[in-house]
Image (cartoon, rainbow, N blue to C red):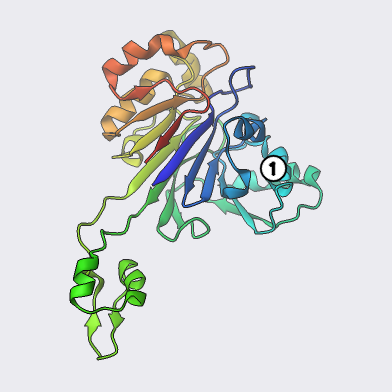
């Protein structure tokens, strides 16, 4: 089970009632944070998020509304007595910017490991600091600077069948290894494959997060079958389309069309323009395109 919280839904600049876009995803007491605009640590406190659980921070790109909250967040994490390393992954060209932002933090009581990611090709890596079964996939987006979309894919173990293990007289100490997919050898020399004591395989959980991009065709494949698709929708007025094309952003309708083509289970819109005071006014129109569209507000939560 993964717990998701959208800490903020704003783009460009924070408002008194809307923090900048940042997403928190927790699994088994460890968490990933995607993007960290100004005031993210305040939003986290407001919504009851424990900063000490963050093990990995993913940055989409280095525009201010996605990255300038890092110094405050890192200092707040340090004030929570953290000593274990923390990793920040971002497009490779962002790393020097992040290093400069971190220079105002002084000496943190933990190590920050920076990881530059490829900017012009799809890439994936295992998020071992969260769980060996969690894979982070990236996709280059189309914005004014190098920008990445992220998919978090969590493979799930098949159902364990203790009745089978008992019938085969397999000692309990071997059960966890079998459930983890390992073949074990018993004292009498019998080799037991994991399939002997496991049942139906569970489909992986998938969270896709995309913001600050034109609606490029590959996005529907990147978000395909996502349990939750979190996507920017800066405006809901079609007459803003030309302006959005110039600035490298999407309309809410663009996000809904992608969600529909991707066969996503649910869409959370985010990264609203400060000019969109009440994005919920577009709800009926957007749900005609994609019925499971949520006009997100700060603090919205979901368990996958």
Q: Position of residue 232 (x, y in %)?
A: 46, 26
Relative to 45, is 224 on the left or the right?
left
**Relative horizontal placement of residue 137, taking residue 45 as reference (left or right):** left
The residue depicted at 42 percent of the width and 54 percent of the height is 135
Above/below status of 138 relative to 69: below
Q: Looking at the image, which residue is at 46% across and 13% down?
A: 279
Residue situated in front as seen by the camera: 119 or 231 = 231
Q: Nearer the viewer, residue 118 or 193?
A: 193
Spot occupied by residue 251 in the image (x, y as percentages of width and height): 43, 19
Q: Residues within 10 Å of mark 1 (few under 14, many from 20)?
A: some
The relative height of residue 163 versus residue 40 in the rendered view (above or below) is below
Residue beneath disc 1: 97
Q: Could you tell me if residue 268 is visible in this image?
A: yes
Residue 114 visible? The answer is: no
Residue 245 sits above or below residue 144 on the image: above
- In the image, 283 versus 244, the foreground residue is 283
User: Residue visible at 22% across and 69% down?
Assistant: 197
Q: Position of residue 180 (x, y in %)?
A: 34, 67
Q: Name the image quarter holding the C terminus.
A: top left
Image quarter of residue 188: bottom left
């Amino acid at each position: 089970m993964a717990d998701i919280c959208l800490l903020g839904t704003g783009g460009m600049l924070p408002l008194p009632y809307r923090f900048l876009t940042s997403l928190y995803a927790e699994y088994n007491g460890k968490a990933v944070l995607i993007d960290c605009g100004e005031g993210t640590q305040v939003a986290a406190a407001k919504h009851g998020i424990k900063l000490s659980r963050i093990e990995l921070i993913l940055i989409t790109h280095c525009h201010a509304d996605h990255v300038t909250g890092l110094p405050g967040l890192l200092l707040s994490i340090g004030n929570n007595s953290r000593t274990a390393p923390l990793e920040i992954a971002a497009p490779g060209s962002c790393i020097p910017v992040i290093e400069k932002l971190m220079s105002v933090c002084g000496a943190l009581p933990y190590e920050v490991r920076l990881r530059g990611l490829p900017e012009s090709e799809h890439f994936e890596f295992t998020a071992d600091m969260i769980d060996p079964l969690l894979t982070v996939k990236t996709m280059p987006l189309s914005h004014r600077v190098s920008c990445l979309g992220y998919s978090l894919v969590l493979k799930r173990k098949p159902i364990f069948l203790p009745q089978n293990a008992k019938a085969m007289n397999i000692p309990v100490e071997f059960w966890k290894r079998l459930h983890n997919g390992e073949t074990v050898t018993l004292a009498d020399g019998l080799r037991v494959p994991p399939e002997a004591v496991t049942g139906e395989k569970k489909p992986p959980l998938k969270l896709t997060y995309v913001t600050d991009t034109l609606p490029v065709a590959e996005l529907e494949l990147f978000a395909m079958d996502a349990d939750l698709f979190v996507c920017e929708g800066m405006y809901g007025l079609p007459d803003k389309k030309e302006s959005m094309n110039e600035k490298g952003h999407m309309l809410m309708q663009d996000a809904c069309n992608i969600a529909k083509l991707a066969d996503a289970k649910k869409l959370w819109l985010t990264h609203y323009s400060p000019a969109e005071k009440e994005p919920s006014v577009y709800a009926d129109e957007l749900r005609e395109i994609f019925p499971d569209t949520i006009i997100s507000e700060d603090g919205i939560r979901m368990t996958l």
